[in-house]
Image: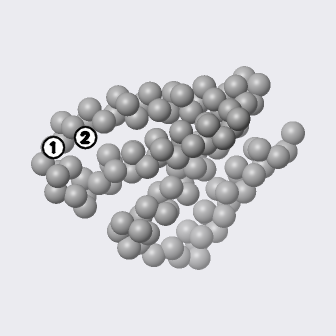
Amino acid sequence: MNLFIGILLSILGQVLVFFQVQGTVKYQFLQDHKMWVIIMGMPITWIFMLATKNLVSWSDGVLWPTSLIGFSVGIVVFAILSKILFGETISAKTAVCIALALLIVVVQIFWK
């Protein structure tokens, strides 16, 4: 259960970070209210702290799986949102990198 919660919180945190960082390029509201964008960092940090706590608990206190899973979730979330919201194309090189990120998650979860 800790793995599931940790990954869900990582996804939520990455989605919020995407809007915090890249959203100011696309959305005028975020450009006009930069202080709110900065303030968003506090709850986002809390979400990532909870994700880390759950993932570290799942991995019996080992930090590497947490870091690698968090990195990989970030790559996948970024790829999906940049495609949907910005119309970014996914080249063969990018697709291979996304596949490798997913493979990292699979290795971390199933290789004991």
Image mark for residue 37: 2
Left or right, 73 with reference to 31: right
Pointer 1 with pointer 2, Cβ within 8 A: yes
Compared with residue 64, is residue 12 higher up or lower down, i.e. above or below?
below
Other residues around mark 2 within 10 Å, as few (<14) / some (14–19) / many (≥20): some
For this orientation, the residue located farthest to the front is 1
Can residue 67 be seen in the rendering of this structure? no
Left or right, 71 with reference to 106: left
Which residue occupies 60% across, 50% down?
72
Under tag 1, what secondary structure?
loop
Going by the numbered disc 1, the residue's amino acid type is His
Image mark for residue 33: 1
- Say which of 87 and 63 sits in front: 87
Quarter holding the N terminus? top right
Compared with residue 65, is residue 63 higher up or lower down, i.e. above or below?
above
Which residue occupies 42% across, 30% down?
45
Residue 60 in the image, given as x and y percentages of width and height: 76, 25
For this orientation, the residue located farthest to the top is 61
Residue 54 in the image, given as x and y percentages of width and height: 63, 29
Residue 65, picture quadrant: top right
Left or right, 36 with reference to 4: left
Which residue occupies 58% across, 49% down?
73
Going by the numbered disc 2, the residue's amino acid type is Val
Can residue 5 be seen in the rendering of this structure? yes
Under tag 2, what secondary structure?
helix
